[in-house]
Amino acid sequence: MFIVGHRGARARAPENTLAALRTGMACADYVEIDVRLTRDGIPVVIHDATVDRTTNGTGRVRDLALDDLRSLDAGEGEKIPTLREVLSLVDGRSGLIVEIKEQGTEEIVCSTLLENLPERCMLVSFHAGSVAAAKKLLPGAGAGLIFSEEQGDPVRDAADLGADAVLPRFDRLDGGLVRTAHERGLLVIPWVLNSVEDIHRAESLGVDGFASDDPCMARDATRG
């Protein structure tokens, strides 16, 4: 059962920063990031559509140039990293899961990944179209469909897309979903597990991996 450092290790460092990724890589098998495009079309690593929550600035990411974003404090003196910076940091030291936040950005994100593609890489999204595009543009990487709400049959949808994994929010996880996904040849990677009890429950259900805000705690829990 592998561990994914959610937004690096957001419980221990500012989320989606190089500091969080370094912390996550010390304990996790993969680190996970969120990617959006700047006004000038550069893939950067930030979760929200705006910078308001995670930096000392305001405004939409898509309305700000890279230089504008780089002038902001993303917490504890950290900057919003570019995807290229993350790839340079990971560089064989960890697997990488990239969440595509915006439909229509797949081509730029995938072309950037191809410049320095990690050996273990997966592109994931809530958007079915983004998952399909990722499979086409980057066949050498995995792809996964994320879901959090009651919505049709996400396992069937993921299989129909040719995805490799489903990523359910933890409260959507149950034994039936795990069995059905495995029958379809899909990995099951729930999110976000931040307690020993939740980790042990997921393990008992037979998941393949899970995301945690505190991957070092999670590593200790899986050894217990």
Image: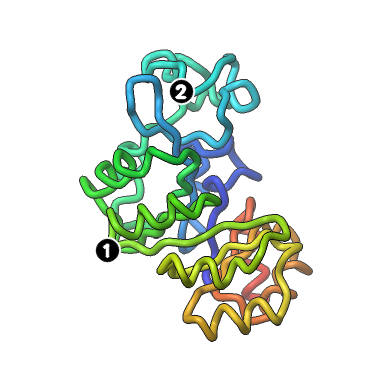
Residue at 66% across / 64% down in the picture?
Answer: 152
Q: Which of the two residues, 16 or 133, is positioned nearer the viewer here?
A: 133
Residue, disc 2:
62
**Callout 2: 10 Å neighbours few (<14), some, many (20+)?**
some
Residue, disc 1:
140
Q: How many marks?
A: 2
Relative to residue 222, is residue 143 drawn left or right? left
Q: Quadrant of the N terminus?
A: bottom right
Residue lying farthest right?
Answer: 197
Q: Which of the two residues, 25 or 134, is positioned nearer the viewer here?
A: 134
**Of the residues shown, which amino acid type is indicated by label 2?**
Arg
Relative to residue 167, is residue 22 drawn left or right? left
* Above or below for 70 versus 200: above
Percent position (x, y) of residue 212? 63, 56
**Of the residues shown, which amino acid type is indicated by label 1?**
Gly
Judging from the image, the colouring scheme is rainbow
Q: CA distance from mark 2 to mark 1?
A: 28 Å
Q: Which of the two residues, 152 or 111, is positioned nearer the viewer here?
A: 152
